[in-house]
Image (cartoon, rainbow, N blue to C red):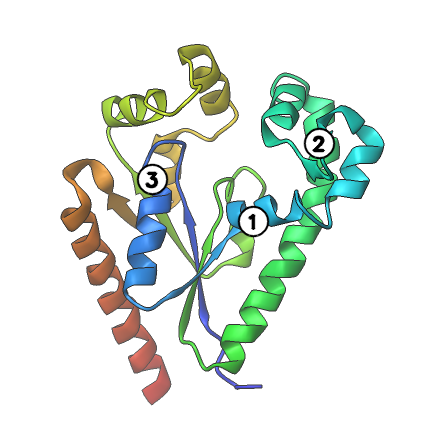
Amino acid sequence: MSEIRPLRIGLTGSIGMGKSTTAQLFRDEGIAVFDSDAIVHELYQGAAVEPIAKSFPQVVENGVINRAKLADVVLKNPQALKKVEEIVHPLVWSERDKFFKTYQEKGAHIVVYDIPLLFEKGVDSSVDIIIVASATSEAQKTRVLARPGMTVEKFEVLKSKQMSDVEKRARADFIVDTSFGLESARQQVRDILDKLTQSLSKQDKK
C-alpha cells in the first residue's frame, strides 16, 4: 500500500444548494468522489434489503427497497429513521473505507466524500477539510420545489432535519457558492484544489 495518505475532503451542503453539482465538478478535475447517496441506493438493492425488511416489510418490492415508501415511513417517525440509520450507516462507512484504501493504493493525493449529513451525523471528525456547497435561500427553494413530487411542506420537513446553511458555512474550510452558475462554481473548485495542492506540495518538501 502507498505510504501517501490522501487528503480527505468532506463535501456537504443543505438540500438544493448544489452539492451534487459541486461533486461532479471535482470529478471533472480528476478527483475521486465517494457518493454516499449512490452507495445507499446500491445498498437498497442489496445488502440493506434483508435487515430493513425485518422491521419494515411494507417498503420492499420485488426484492428491493422502494425509496419513496421508505421515505414516507421515516419522514415523520424519528424512531423508524433511527432504526434505518443503524442498519445503513455502518454499511456505508464500510464502503467508504474500501474506497479510501483503493485510492490510497493508487497514490491519490486528494479524495472527496460527498456526504449530505456530514455535520448532522458527526462525520465531520473523520475528514481533513470541509467544503460546503451553498446558495441563496431563494435559489435553494426554487431548485427544490422544481423536483418531481416535491411540495412546500415536504421541503420544510427536510430542511428542518438539516443544520442551517449559516452554521454550515461558519464551520467550513471552504465554500462553493453555486448561486452564480456552473462556470463560477467550476472556477471556485479549481481555486480550492490549487490551494490544497500547493499546501500538500509544501508539506511533502518538509
Q: What is the three-letter code of the residue carrying label 3?
A: Arg
| For marks 2 and 3 on the same chain, the one whose residue lies earlier in the sequence | 2
The residue drawn where x is 28% and y is 62% is: 28
Q: Is residue 177 left or right of residue 120?
A: left
Depth check, front residue: 88 or 127: 88
Q: Is residue 139 left or right of residue 96?
A: left
- Residue 61's disc number: 2
Q: CA separation, marks 3 and 1?
A: 16 Å
Q: CA separation, marks 2 and 3?
A: 39 Å
Q: Position of residue 90 (x, y in %)?
A: 70, 51
The residue drawn where x is 36% and y is 43% is: 19
- Pick the quarter of the image with the N terminus: bottom right
| For marks 3 and 1 on the same chain, the one whose residue lies earlier in the sequence | 1
Give the labeled residue for mark 3. Answer: 169
- Residue 184's disc number: none
Q: Residues within 10 Å of mark 2 (few under 14, many from 20)?
A: few
- Figure check: 32 above or below 46: below
* Label 3 residue SS: helix
User: Residue 149 is drawn in which quadrant?
Assistant: top left
- Figure check: 178 above or below 39: above
Residue sitting farthest toward the bottom: 205
Give the labeled residue for mark 1. Answer: 123
User: Residue 206 is drawn in which quadrant?
Assistant: bottom left
